[in-house]
Image (tube, rainbow, N blue to C red):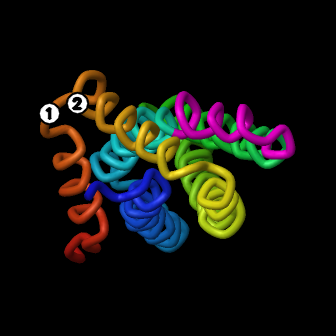
Amino acid sequence: MTDSPTEQLRHEHELVLMVVEAMEREVDDIERTGRVHRERVAQMVDFTRNFADGCHHSKEERVLFPALEERDAAAGGPVSVMLSEHEAGREAIRAIVAALPDIDESEAARTAVAENLALYAHLLRLHINKENTVLFPLAERILSDQEQEMIAAEFERIEKEETGAGVHQRYHELAHTLATPPAEG
């Protein structure tokens, strides 16, 4: 049997947290050395845009959240908080992308990268905790087994038809790569 939708999303949270930890290490390194690892940060942005936001948040926003709101009007409050936090994360990533081209010449750009990596990491830690401890238990309580199966099937369709074959695995591998601290040098 396929994992429930919330179990699938919790597993994805584990990957996101691996990249969040890599972001936190990068912030520490920037603060210590004044240097940004451009390629690693670009990989973090890629992971965030295409996996955390493009795949994971897409499934939440397009499938799970509407199902919760349809089933229980009281779910609207927590869902609106989750949606606003998704947007805050997108804003932090846009700020990183805007600053990244100038990191070699500009201390302000390096600071903007560090501050927005730290903001994103902090935001996502809190956000994931809320989803895992509040929103997902709510979903497990109010959604019937049949509704959960339909949501899981839609998640599968999104990954197959929209995200694309092999993409989930590629980002799984990237999360593990980023979780490994770079060699000093």
Q: Which residues are magenta?
A: 60-75
Name the kind of residue labelled 1 in the image. Answer: Ala
In the rendered view of the protein, which quadrant contains the N terminus? Answer: bottom left
- Quadrant position of residue 119: bottom right
Q: Are marks 1 and 2 in contact (CB under 8 Å)?
A: yes
Of the residues tagged 1 and 2, which is closer to the observer? Answer: 2
Label number found at residue 160? 2
| Residue under label 1 | 165
Residue drawn at point x = 45 percent, y = 65 percent: 17
Q: Is label 2 in a helix, a strand or a loop?
A: helix
* Location of residue 33 in the rendering, given as x and y in whole percent from the top left corner: 45, 69
Membership of 111 in magenta stretch:
no
* Location of residue 4 in the rendering, given as x and y in whole percent from the top left corner: 42, 56
Above or below, 171 against 65 in this view is below
Label 1, residues with CA under 10 Å away: few <14, some 14-19, many ≥20: few
Seen as rendered, the residue at the extreme left is: 166
